[in-house]
C-alpha cells in the first residue's frame, strides 16, 4: 500500500481522500513490500520427490500424496498442484473442510481426495457434494454418509468409502468386535460402496519391523472376514513415508494381491523432502532408504532479514527478563521473526540461525515478532541481510530436524506450526 503525504490528501475533496491510496496503488500496481519473514516452496523439488517416491513404490503400489494441515505447513495451494502435476491421482487431507479447500484449488473428480480423519456431524452432505472420499469407521459416520448420499440422489454403490481398521494403534478405526456391524451399511441397495480398506502403521519407523508385521497379520485376518461377508474392496490403503522407505511397499502389495486388491501408500514427510528417522537405525539400510537419502530434496526454506545491528558493551542485558548478558563487547542483530511466526520460544539461547553463511546464536528470549542474534563473529552484517531459519545459505544448512532436536519435538510439528501470517511463496 502506498500512502500519499497527508498534505497532498488535504487538497482533495473529502470523498476522494479516502480512496486516493487505493487508486494510486491500482494505477501504479505497486504491491506493499511485505514484512520479510516468509517461506519459499520449491514446487520443482516436490514434483521430483513425488516422482522419486512413486518409482520406489512401482510397480507394486500407487501413492496418495498427503497434503493435510495445509500440506504440512508448505501451502496446499502450492503443493497439491505440484503433486498432481507429478502424477498423483490421490490427495490425502484431514477433514472435510481441508478437502473442500483442496477441491477449491481446481481439481476435477479424476483427482481423488481422501478425508483421513472422518466426518464430523453434519459434514457428510458437503463431503459428497465435493466428491470427497471419506475414511469411516464409526457406525454413525456410515449412517450420516448414507443419508446424505440418498438425499443427493446417489445411485446404489456410487459413493466410495474407505473403511479404517484399528490394527493396534487404538486411535481411530473399527475394532474387530465392531466390524461385523458395519458390513450391512454396504448392502447392494446402499449408495455406499466399500472401495478401500485402510489402516495406519504406527511404528513403521522401528527398524525391526516387528510391530508392523503384527499389524499386517491382523489386517490380513480382517480382510478375510470382509471377503467372507461377501464384500470386496479395490484398494488396500496402508503405509506412511517410513513404511515406504523401509521397503514395506512390496509386503503391503503382496498382502493386497492375496485378497485381489491394489496397494495404496500414503507418504507425507518424504514428499516434502525429509527422510524419517528409524529407531534404532538399521544395520544395513534397505535400498529405498539409501536411495531416498541421496534423492529427496527439501521443499521448504524459511527466511527472514536483519532489521538492524547494534554494538553493545559487556554487561548489556538482552531481551525479556535479561536472560542473556553480553560477556564482552558484542554486535547484536535484530531479526524479523518470533514465536508468533512459529519460531519456538525454547530456541532462545540454544539455537543458531544463518547469516552470511555462518551460524549466529539466538541470544535472549525470542519475542512474539522478533529475535536477537549474536553476530559478533560474523563480519559485515547489516540491515536487510538474509537470515535463514530453515534451509541452506552458503555451505551451511538448517533442517527441520535440527530445529526439532533442539526443542525435543519432530519435524512434522516444526513445519505445521509455521504461522499462517508467514507468506508462502513458490520459487
Ligand atoms: C499424516 C499421515 C500419513 C503420512 O505420514 P508421514 O509419516 O508424514 O509419511 C499417512 N497416513 C495417515 C493416516 C496420516 O495421518
Image: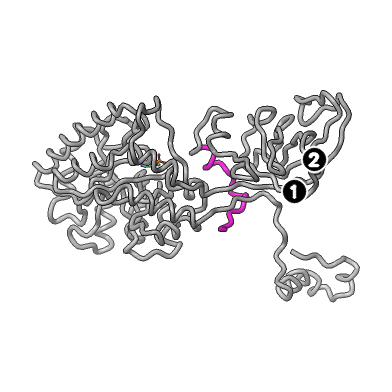
Question: For numbered disc 2, what is the local secondary structure?
Answer: loop
Left or right, 360 with reference to 420: right
Mark closest to the chain's N terminus, 1 or 2: 2
Q: Is mark 1 on a helix, strand or loop?
A: loop
- Judge whether 311 appears above or below 391 on screen: above
Q: Residues within 10 Å of mark 1 (few under 14, many from 20)?
A: some
Q: Is 327 left, or right, of 427 in this rendering?
A: right
Left or right: where 409 falls relative to 146: right
User: Is 276 placed left or right of 214 in the picture?
Assistant: right
In which quadrant of this rendering is ligand 1 seen?
top left
Residue 380: x, y in percent?
81, 43
**Quarter the C terminus occupies:** bottom right
What segment is highlighted magenta in the picture?
Answer: 413-427
Q: Quadrant of the N terminus?
A: bottom right
Residue drawn at point x = 50 percent, y = 37 percent? 411
Which residue is labeled 2 in the image?
379
Q: Are marks 1 and 2 in contact (CB under 8 Å)?
A: no
Residue 125: percent from left, percent from top: 34, 57
User: Which residue bears the numbered disc 1?
Assistant: 385
- Magenta stretch holds residue 426: yes
Amino acid at each position: 500500500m502506498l500512502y500519499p503525504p497527508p498534505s497532498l490528501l488535504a487538497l482533495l475533496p473529502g470523498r476522494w481522500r479516502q480512496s486516493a491510496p487505493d487508486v494510486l496503488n491500482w494505477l501504479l500496481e505497486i504491491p506493499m513490500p511485505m514484512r520479510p519473514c516468509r517461506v519459499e516452496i520449491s514446487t520443482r523439488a516436490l514434483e521430483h520427490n513425488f516422482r522419486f517416491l512413486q518409482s520406489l513404490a512401482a510397480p507394486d503400489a500407487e501413492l496418495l500424496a498427503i497434503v493435510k494441515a495445509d500440506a504440512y505447513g508448505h501451502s496446499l495451494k502450492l503443493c497439491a498442484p505440484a503433486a498432481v502435476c507429478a502424477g498423483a491421482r490421490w490427495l490425502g487431507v484431514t477433514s472435510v473442510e481441508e478437502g473442500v479447500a483442496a477441491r477449491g484449488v481446481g481439481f476435477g473428480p479424476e483427482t481423488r481426495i481422501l478425508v483421513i480423519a472422518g466426518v464430523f456431524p453434519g459434514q457428510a452432505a458437503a463431503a459428497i457434494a465435493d466428491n470427497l472420499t471419506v475414511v469411516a469407521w464409526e457406525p454413525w459416520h456410515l449412517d450420516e454418509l448414507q443419508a446424505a448420499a440418498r438425499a443427493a440422489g446417489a445411485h446404489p454403490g456410487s459413493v466410495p468409502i474407505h473403511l479404517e481398521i484399528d490394527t493396534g494403534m487404538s486411535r481411530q478405526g473399527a475394532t474387530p468386535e465392531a466390524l461385523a456391524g458395519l458390513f450391512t451399511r454396504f448392502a447392494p441397495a446402499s449408495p455406499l460402496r466399500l472401495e478401500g480398506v485402510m489402516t495406519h502403521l504406527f511404528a513403521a519407523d522401528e527398524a525391526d519391523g516387528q510391530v508392523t508385521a503384527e499389524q499386517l497379520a491382523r489386517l490380513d485376518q480382517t480382510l478375510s472376514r470382509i471377503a467372507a461377508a461377501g464384500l470386496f474392496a479395490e484398494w488396500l490403503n496402508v503405509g506412511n513415508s517410513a513404511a515406504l522407505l523401509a521397503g514395506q511397499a512390496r509386503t503391503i502389495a503382496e498382502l493386497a494381491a492375496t485378497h485381489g486388491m491394489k496397494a495404496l501408500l500414503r507418504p507425507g514427510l518424504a514428499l516434502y523432502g525429509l527422510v524419517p528417522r528409524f529407531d534404532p537405525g538399521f544395520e544395513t539400510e534397505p535400498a529405498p532408504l539409501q536411495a531416498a537419502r541421496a534423492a529427496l530434496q527439501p521443499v521448504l526454506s524459511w527466511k527472514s532479514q536483519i532489521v538492524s545491528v547494534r554494538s553493545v558493551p559487556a554487561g548489556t542485558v538482552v531481551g525479556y527478563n535479561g536472560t542473556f548478558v553480553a560477556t564482552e563487547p558484542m554486535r547484536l542483530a535484530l531479526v524479523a521473526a518470533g514465536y508468533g511466526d512459529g519460531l519456538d520460544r525454547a530456541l532462545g539461547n540454544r539455537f543458531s540461525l544463518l547469516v552470511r553463511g555462518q551460524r549466529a546464536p539466538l541470544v535472549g528470549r525470542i519475542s512474539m515478532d522478533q529475535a536477537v542474534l549474536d553476530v559478533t563473529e560474523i563480519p559485515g552484517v547489516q540491515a536487510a541481510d538474509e537470515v535463514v531459519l530453515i534451509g541452506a545459505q552458503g555451505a551451511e544448512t538448517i533442517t527441520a530436524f535440527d530445529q526439532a532436536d533442539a526443542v525435543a519435538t519432530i519435524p512434522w510439528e516444526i513445519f505445521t506450526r509455521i504461522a499462517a501470517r508467514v507468506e508462502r511463496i513458490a520459487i
